[in-house]
Amino acid sequence: MPPRPTSVATVRIDLHTHSNVSDGTDSPAEVMRQAAAAGVDVVALTDHDTTDGWSAAVGALAPGLTLISGAEISCSIASTGGRDVDLHLLAYLFDPSEPLFAAERYALTTDRERRARTMVEKLVALGAPVTYAQVAAIAGDASSVGRPHIARALVDASVVPDVASAFTAEWIGSNGRAYAEKYTLDAAAAVRLVLAAGGVPVFAHPAAAKRGPVVTEADIAGLADAGLAGLEVDHPDHSPQDRARLRALAGGLGLFVTGSSDDHGDITGHRIGCETTSESVYEELLARATGIGPISG
């Protein structure tokens, strides 16, 4: 196994970033360069539903930078709050060749083009001058196309002033006029798939209410029963009150707590390292993983 950082005072660990393999703006190699420039020691690449950026990230690792290979999995849950809620599950250090989990990731990525085309059709019907070809060009790959790419096309067409303004009920926000449902995994089933592939499942930004409806504490307890390992608590979209509540909940459920930037490059302002994970949690994550190991430059 590659050497691990040992000094709590100097180790900086960011367990959630995105490249342009999904909805970030920078290549996997550039994400690694940005991480090194930000003084991060350990960085996870967690593109949506895909491992396609892993090899390029490995090839760009600087000396002293460690990569945690991962993915952010699209899920949903029948919430005890009385509605279906979309959520994201961070999966770390799983075996990408494990067939059941690989098949589900393939289903998730192949559904992206259908969904994007449906949303573009709705936008055109609403009078927005965008085309699927424009969206696909921004995404670069049909398997990675998503709402952020559609939002950028709306910005380019001067329909909205910025990406955030596209994620509203007026346009492509959850249940918005041009929104389209996507294929998702049941969250508890996704937790079990990650575990069966030797990975470590962590609930991403569970209290990020500005993204849409959030789950209840009972929902999180149910996922903990299914094998959830941790909660991403220290996240830019979480208020101090959210963090305190989630930290207490995690402690009661025996879940570890992570911190991450959820960097998307230009979209989020190149913020790798703005939130970090403790080394003790990092060591626990490594101890739990049986799929693959970290890779150091």
Image (cartoon, rainbow, N blue to C red):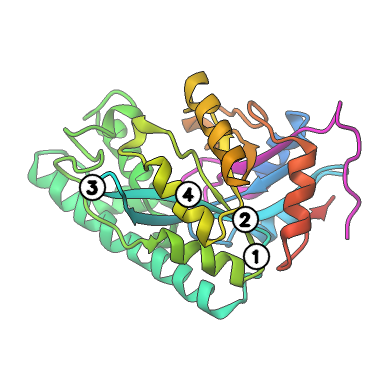
3D distance between C-alphas at marks 1 and 3: 32 Å
Residue under numbered circle 3: 82
Q: Marks 4 and 1: which is nearer the front?
A: 4
Neighbours of disc 1 within 10 Å: few (<14), some (14-19), many (20+): many
Res 31 → quadrant: top right
Give the image location of residue 286, x and y in percent: 77, 54
Residue under numbered circle 2: 70
Mark found first going from the N terminus, 1 or 2: 2
Q: How many marks?
A: 4
Is the residue under label 2 in contact with that under label 1 (CB below 8 Å)?
yes
Give the image location of residue 225, x and y in percent: 52, 58
Q: Is residue 137 above or below residue 198?
A: above
Which residue type does callout 3 highlight? Answer: Gly
Whether residue 272 is visible to the viewer of this picture, yes or no, is: yes
Whether residue 234 is visible to the viewer of this picture, yes or no, is: no
Residue under numbered circle 4: 221
Which residue type does callout 2 highlight? Answer: Gly
Give the image location of residue 213, x and y in percent: 30, 39
Mark found first going from the N terminus, 1 or 3: 3
Which residue type does callout 1 highlight? Answer: Phe
Residues shaded magenta = 1-29
Decide if residue 250 is on the left or right side of residue 5: left
Q: Marks 4 and 2: which is nearer the front?
A: 4
Q: Secondary structure at mark 1?
A: loop
3D distance between C-alphas at marks 4 and 3: 16 Å
Which residue type does callout 4 highlight? Answer: Ala
